Image: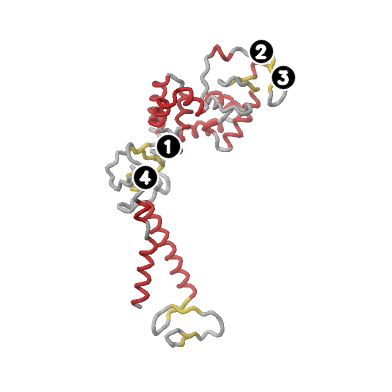
Amino acid sequence: MEDYEEDYYSSDRDSLDGLENEESDVQWAPSKGSSSKVITKESLLVAQREDLRRVMDLLSIREHHARTLLIHYRWDVEKLFAVLVEKGKTFLFAEAGVTLVGKHDLGSSPCTVMCNICIEDVPGTEVTKMNCGHNFCNNCWTEHFIVKINEGQSKRIRCMAHKCNAICDEAIVRNLVRRRHPNLAEKFDRFLLESYIDDNKMVKWCPSTPHCGNAIRVEDDEFCEVECSCGLQFCFSCLADAHSPCSCLMWELWTKKCRDESETVNWITVHTKPCPKCHKPVEKNGGCNLVSCICGQAFW
């Protein structure tokens, strides 16, 4: 039995060998001292607008363009500013699909325009031109927007023109979709709002069950433990229960090991019987109901 126990604990050590080297490359701050903020449903819009305002003020652009930039750079304002300083405004806008144009550049639509999508002549009042300069009929635009929203691409709906990288104006998307599907327009707005959490590495939903509806934002370090106002304490990096001083990798391997061993114990309980002499589990693999243990004890 001593040999068995030695092998068992040895396997524990073997399963965790090499983690020290892997963990040396992972930043980990087990303390709860990292600055964090709880974002409720009511304060989500305010938190989003703080970052939007910083970008709008610096670049003197509209809210739609600021949101497009921030979604592209995953709401990392510092990274956005770094790209601006290093590569300039032209590269910054082109990379994110932002096209700036004045109202005089849009011009007025002629009386009749042929839509290059449906190949039909439509009145100029039923045609919409995006900032990139491409114009199509409102019906084709609306169908395009509906498909993209239902596919979950609300946050970055591109122009329909071939090889055009421009992101469509969210106000135009909202107005055209609302005429036909008001509920879908609300879904579009919700996706834009929640992108602040879904695409932001410094903000994550609280993993409580049932969900409390809150999110947590950390200011400095994403490798930390936080506490939601609902009372749940969790690791911000992996969203598991608080597990300091273990790293996330160590905790994941330990959880998997416990889960695998639990399944093994369940199988032994169902498919074996303990020997009345040595108490080791014995599996019946055929024949009559009389079985013999390796210790020599026979039993039913």
What residue lies at 51% left-to-right and 19% top-to-bottom? 100
Vertical order, 260 against 212 (above or below): below
Q: Which residue is mark 1?
A: 200
Residue 40, image quadrant: top left
Q: Which residue is mark 4?
A: 236
Say whether marks 4 and 1 touch (CB < 8 Å): no
- Nearer to us of marks 3 and 1 is 1
Marked residue nearer the N-terminal end (4 or 3): 3
Vertical order, 84 against 103 (above or below): below
What is the crowding at mark 1: few (fewer than 14 residues within 10 Å), some, or many (at least 20)? some
What residue lies at 54% left-to-right and 79% top-to-bottom? 285
Say whether marks 3 and 2 touch (CB < 8 Å): no
Say whether marks 3 and 1 touch (CB < 8 Å): no
Callout 1 amino acid: Asn
Marked residue nearer the N-terminal end (4 or 2): 2
Using the image, tell me which numbered label, if any, was put on residue 147.
Answer: none
Callout 4 amino acid: Phe
- Label 4 SS: loop
Callout 3 amino acid: Asp
Q: Which residue is mark 2?
A: 110
Marked residue nearer the N-terminal end (3 or 1): 3
**Residue 253 place in picture, x, y as percent:** 40, 57
Front residue of 258 and 173: 258
**Residue 102 place in picture, x, y as percent:** 52, 14
What residue lies at 38% left-to-right and 64% top-to-bottom? 14
Q: CA distance from mark 1 to mark 2?
A: 43 Å
Callout 2 amino acid: Pro
- Label 3 SS: strand
Q: Which residue is mark 3?
A: 121
